[in-house]
Image: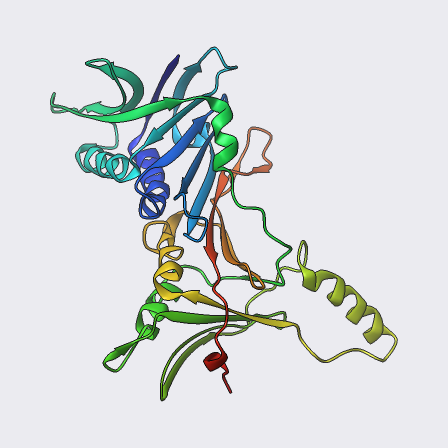
């Protein structure tokens, strides 16, 4: 089994921006390398916890790499992503634009490690040996994203610039001296999205309007097609489809942490509401022009936040 790769300073910055939000979701994560892609699954054993899943092309992370194993050049390992994030940030801070970072699998005193190291132009060397556990590739089937129903509403999020949605949610959770445990998320096919925090006697709400709506692969798609047909016949339905779910505010904040580290590494992002199940954020990484001049996909990161049941006291005006 062998994995060795080298990255430029820009590629290390890209990789660390992806690792950073995932590292905050669970103590450890599962990484699967194959001949062309890296997949990362950050999830706890509790199905009610948030989860992150990422898939990215290796040639976007590394300027050169070699991978081999007895299992068709596939390797799976379990790793502490917070250690990986720290090592990448440390390496990045020491690199000049001409320096190279090396990442490889190796053994240190019989312990498998993912090693991150560099030799800088000033002749100094910096290395981090991160203990990891080598697993059977087949085990990654247990690390795949949860299966969910078709989303009711999908809206494109504003670009992750200030003030971010995450900042608004942080402000919503505290109403005066009281803190709400839950946030109500509501979206509509007319292109608006709202976040509401409530405590007894107080309510605070942030609304984002004029958002683009994704109709494919959602429950709204068929309703939209029927409505367009009715409108062409002069009997359209003016009612927009909207759906509201309730989530824990701490968990909702966790799936928006990507807006901090990934601001410059996002092509587009969508928020999907699966009624009574999940709030999902799907982040598309920047596309690039391939050898043929056509746009090619780099990869994606997806974050999952389970909903909680409504209480009788949750009735809002």
Q: Is residue 68 left or right of residue 84?
A: right
Q: Residue 150, relative to residue 300: is it above or below?
A: below
Q: Where is residue 191 in the image (x, y as percent from the top left)?
A: 58, 70
Q: Is 116 displayed left or right of 186 in the figure?
A: left
Instruction: Indicate the position of residue 75 as horizontal and vertical percent values.
Output: 43, 21
Q: Looking at the picture, tell me which residue is in the foreground, 255 or 179.
A: 179
Q: Nearer the viewer, residue 9 or 68?
A: 68
Give the quarter of the image for residue 3.
top left
Of residues 160 and 312, which is closer to you in this image? 312
What is the x, y in percent for residue 237? Answer: 76, 78
Q: In which quarter of the image is residue 256?
A: bottom left
Toward the viewer: 294 or 206?
206
User: Going 37% across and 52% down the picture, which residue do you hit?
Assistant: 258
Q: Position of residue 240 (x, y in %)?
A: 67, 75
Residue at 41% x, 43% y is 45
- The N terminus lies in quadrant: top left
Q: Is residue 177 above or below residue 272?
A: below
Q: Residue at x 64, y 55 (%)?
A: 150
Task: Identify the residue shown where x is 51% and y is 87%.
Answer: 317
Q: Which residue appears farthest toward the right when viewing the image?
A: 233
């Amino acid at each position: 089994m062998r994995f060795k790769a080298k990255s430029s300073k820009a590629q290390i910055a890209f990789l660390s921006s992806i690792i950073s939000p995932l590292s905050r979701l669970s103590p450890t994560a599962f990484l699967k390398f194959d001949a062309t892609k890296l997949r990362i699954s950050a999830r706890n054993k509790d199905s009610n916890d948030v989860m992150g899943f990422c898939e990215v092309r290796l040639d976007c992370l590394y300027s050169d790499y070699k991978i081999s194993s007895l299992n068709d050049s596939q390797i799976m390992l379990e790793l502490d992503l917070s250690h990986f994030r720290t090592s990448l940030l440390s390496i990045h801070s020491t690199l000049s634009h001409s320096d190279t970072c090396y990442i490889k699998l190796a053994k240190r005193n019989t312990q498998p490690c993912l090693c991150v190291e560099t030799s800088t132009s000033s002749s100094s060397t910096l290395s981090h040996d991160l203990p990891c556990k080598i697993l059977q590739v087949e085990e990654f089937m247990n690390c795949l994203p949860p299966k969910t129903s078709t989303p009711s509403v999908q809206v494109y999020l504003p670009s992750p610039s200030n003030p971010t949605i995450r900042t608004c949610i942080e402000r919503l959770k505290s109403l005066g001296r009281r803190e709400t445990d839950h946030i109500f998320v509501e979206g509509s096919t007319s292109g608006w999205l709202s976040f509401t925090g409530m405590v007894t006697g107080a309510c605070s709400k942030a609304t984002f309007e004029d958002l683009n709506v994704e109709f494919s692969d959602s429950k709204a798609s068929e309703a939209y097609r029927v409505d367009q047909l009715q409108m062409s016949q002069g009997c359209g339905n003016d009612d927009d489809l909207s759906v509201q779910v309730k989530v824990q505010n701490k968990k909702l904040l966790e799936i928006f942490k990507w807006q901090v580290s990934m601001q410059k590494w996002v092509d587009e992002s969508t928020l999907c509401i699966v009624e009574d199940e999940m709030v999902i954020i799907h982040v598309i990484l920047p596309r690039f022009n391939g050898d043929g001049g056509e746009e090619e996909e780099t990869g994606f990161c997806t974050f999952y936040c389970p909903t909680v049941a409504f209480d009788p006291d949750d009735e809002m005006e």
